[in-house]
Image (cartoon, coloured by chain):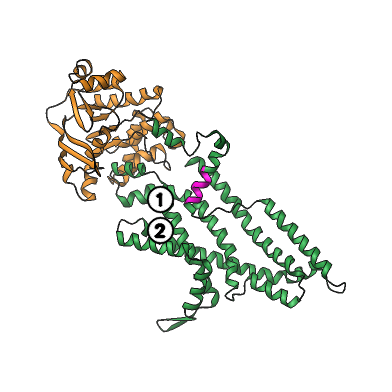
Amino acid sequence: MTQATTEPIVIIRDVHQSFGNVEVLKGVSLEVPKGGVICIIGPSGSGKSTLLRCINGLVPISRGSIRVANFDVHSLRTDQEKIALRKEVSMVFQQYNLFPHKTALENVMMAPVHVLKEGKDEVHTRAVALLKKVGLSAKQDAYPGELSGGQQQRVAIARSLAMRPEVMLFDEVTAALDPETVKEVLNTIQELAQEGMTCILVTHEMRFAREIADEVYFTDGGVIVESGPPAELFDRATKERTRAFLSQIL
Amino acid sequence: MKRSRRRDALPQGTDLPVLLPMAAHLARSAAIERAAGVPMLRLRAAHGMALLVLFAVGCGIAEAQGQPSQPSILTTILKWTPLLLRGFVFNLAISVLAMALGTVAGLFLGFAQISLLPPVKKGAWLATHFFRNAPWLVLLFYCMFLLPFQITVFGVTIPLPDWIKATFGLSLPVMANVSEILRGAVQSIPTTQWESAASLAFTRRQTMWMIILPQCIKRMLPPWMNLYAILTMATVLVSIVGVSEMMTLTRQALSAENRPGLLLAFYSYVLFWFFIYCYPIARWTVRLEARYAVNI
């Protein structure tokens, strides 16, 4: 668990979002301090993933405000502005979404070279170091199709880290993995959190959430039902809905 | 989670036991035919054998109808072969040229189809579907009769012979089909690729050129080659508008010989030449399909 500093790096206020007539988020507010780790839990369709996509501007919001690392995400209009934001906020997806025509190393190097316009040699050194960090030095020339799910997900994490973001978003990153490989991915995330990376995780791994999070948010039906430090939320939930959800999966 | 796993598994399998043995194959060929917009050629060696049999029967009939004084069928065919092959080379030249023209124009049209600007997109959609659904022969006649026989650019007069106009006419449907192949391939790349590229701060243009298109080329190759084989066979259409390619020359040879019995033998001989050219292309296409289906 990390000790968070006081200054919030992500501030979400009263965020509403709808797809057509379906309101997915109905007024969500939360803050994440720099270096903090928060977990968002809740049933499917409760708007967890949508909230993450709103944070890095992949999905526009209809009302409210999102401020991330000096960017007012809700008022970003042009692609250039969104790109500037995404250099600071990186996202890891449930289905890894690696680029299948590139090797692991090329996947990690691509964005820094072409987006940040950094020198190839420097990026190469960094990418090799990142793959070593996620334990995949031996696989740097393998294509995504030749890697297991857990390995692909770790490459995806390295790929996001190569952008040197301020905030990392994890969208159910272990949901598509088998139980044995879940651990290798969680260990990587835990290491990151210990190094002081600000992390927002959407997860179904309750044990992991309890271990790693400074704050856990339980969402249902587009609102935050209850939040608190993991020990409190998991053991002494006050709301009936939270207890019902936790009793189903713990 | 369960659902997304299912969705991933779908191209490889099905829950219906009766379909299981064929499911992977069917899904693969259906996906390719959807992208190509046309059924794939499935030429087999057996088709070639059938043609040979037809040819042999044709020769037999002609031999039986002929008088003893006339030269044998095979001698007659061999006599005409150099001329017919010259026509066949012309067919191939027209097919290569029309394919090149159509591919270049079709790629532009395809990119216009996936443009974010509504007028460009709509216009390209309209052009694509007009030329894709119009009969090839009608387009050919349009070009033959609407294009001038010569054009003058900066005082230089360039003649437009019939075969150039015909090539142009054939390149129109090719263009429309290539446009659809490109659009289909781009749209067949999962949207998650766009999403993850966006989250890594790639621009739309960078995403297109560095991430989407490199993955598309593999998917476009089999339908593109299939289109070429179809085009090659369609080149005989230009005989109707008077270009002296293989069909025209065959007709002339037949009228010069003036022996009705030769009809079946000559035309199956022509078919056989087309088979010899298109069969390797069809086999290669099938092999590419199978290879890329594993990696996609």
The span shown in magenta is B27-34
- Local SS, label 1: helix
Could you tell me residue B259's position as x and y percent?
A: 77, 74
Could you tell me residue B32's position as x and y percent?
A: 50, 49
Q: Report the front residue among A212 and B52.
A: B52
Instruction: Determine whether, in the image, residue B199 is placed left or right of residue B90.
Output: left
Q: Is residue A133 magenta?
A: no
Residue sitting at x 41%, y 34%: A140
Residue A78 at least partly seen: yes
Report which quarter residue A223 is drawn in.
top left
Instruction: Determine whether, in the image, residue B147 is placed left or right of residue B254.
Output: left
Q: What residue is pinned by disc 2?
A: B110
Q: What residue is pinned by disc 1?
A: B186
Chain designation of label 1? B
Q: Residues within 10 Å of mark 1 (few under 14, many from 20)?
A: many
**Location of residue A215 with respect to A61 vertically, above or below:** above
Label at residue A80 = none
- Local SS, label 2: helix
Could you tell me residue B160's position as x and y percent?
A: 50, 78
The amino acid type found where label 1 is placed reads: Val
Residue A141 at least partly seen: no
Task: Report how far apart the C-alphas of labels 1 and 2 lie in the structure.
Answer: 10 Å
* Chain A painted colour: orange
Which chain did the image draw in green? B
